[in-house]
Amino acid sequence: MGLFKNYVSQTRKPEGFLGKMMIKGMNSGHAKMADWGLSHFPEINPHEILEIGCGGGRNAGELLKRYTKAKVTAIDYSPLSVEQAKEYNKTAIESGRCIVQEGNVSALTLETENYDLATAFETIYFWPGLKTCFSEVAKVLTPGGYFMIVNESDGTDAASLKFEKIIDGMKTYTAEQIINVLKEAGFSEIKSFHHESKPWITVIAKK
Ligand SMILES: C[S@@+](CC[C@H](N)C(=O)[O-])C[C@H]1O[C@@H](n2cnc3c(N)ncnc32)[C@H](O)[C@@H]1O
């Protein structure tokens, strides 16, 4: 595998030295987009938040800052992401507000109907079988709980379509495609937002 392909493929499941570099890059590189996504979120006071595909844990940290009464469980199927997210959120873990653990969204082993908000930043491109994964998210959400997806790609931008060809197992989606699968998985009251000048999208759905 060429170095470039190896490096960009670290977005799918970071590991090793290149994975560590990618995680640090994603923590800073995705921050503006993640905060833009969060700015669309309705006024709620979640108690239990599930942050899926947490990478280096920056967004888990942001959720802890924004929702001061909430606990955040951050999961990722990459042991390296879990290690890095634990380091990033060390203080919150020590104070009992944050848990970071390994977990695969395609088969969640978490408590059912426990989370009132689930978030997924820049990760659904890699989820195997979107409907199965969205149904797994629905399983662990409380009735009325929210699921928020934030993507840097709207499924049509040239850069992401190029990466889709390079990174094995990556698939980009339009907001419409995401909405259709969310409906199939039982979500309703779905809203989507597109950034005014960038291909960023946010989709918010209710269980
Ligand atoms: C592009 S990174 C984004 C990381 C972080 N959310 C961010 O915005 O910086 C994608 C992350 O999703 C994780 N991931 C991909 N598929 C997953 C799955 N099926 N279950 C859990 N995590 C997954 C990867 O390991 C990786 O850490």
Image (tube, grey):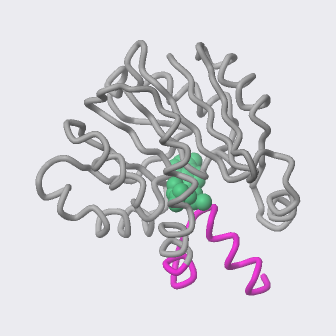
Q: Residue at x 31, y 29 (%)?
A: 46
Q: Which residue is drawn at 48% across and 60% down?
A: 55
- Left-right relation of 98 to 191: left
Q: Is residue 2 above or below residue 159?
A: below
Q: Quadrant of residue 108?
A: top left
State which region is magenta. 1-21
Where residue 93 sits: x, y (%)? 19, 56
Q: Which of 37 and 162 is in front in this view?
A: 37
Q: In this view, does 190 lie above or below 202?
A: above
Question: Looking at this rendering, what residue extends furthest in the left direction?
Answer: 95
Question: Looking at this rendering, what residue extends furthest in the front direction?
Answer: 196
Quarter of the N terminus within the rendering: bottom right
Q: Nearer the viewer, residue 155 or 167?
A: 155
- Left-right relation of 70 to 204: left
- Left-right relation of 52 to 173: left
Where residue 134 sits: x, y (%)? 59, 29
Where residue 87 sits: x, y (%)? 29, 69
Q: In which quarter of the image is residue 88?
A: bottom left
Q: Residue at x 39, y 35 (%)?
A: 109
Magenta stretch: dominant secondary structure: helix
Number of numbered markers: 0
Q: Which residue is drawn at 24% across and 37% down?
A: 70
Residue 17 is covered by the magenta coloring: yes
Q: In this view, does 150 lie above or below 12?
A: above
Residue 13 is covered by the magenta coloring: yes
Q: Ligand 1 lies in which image quarter? A: bottom right
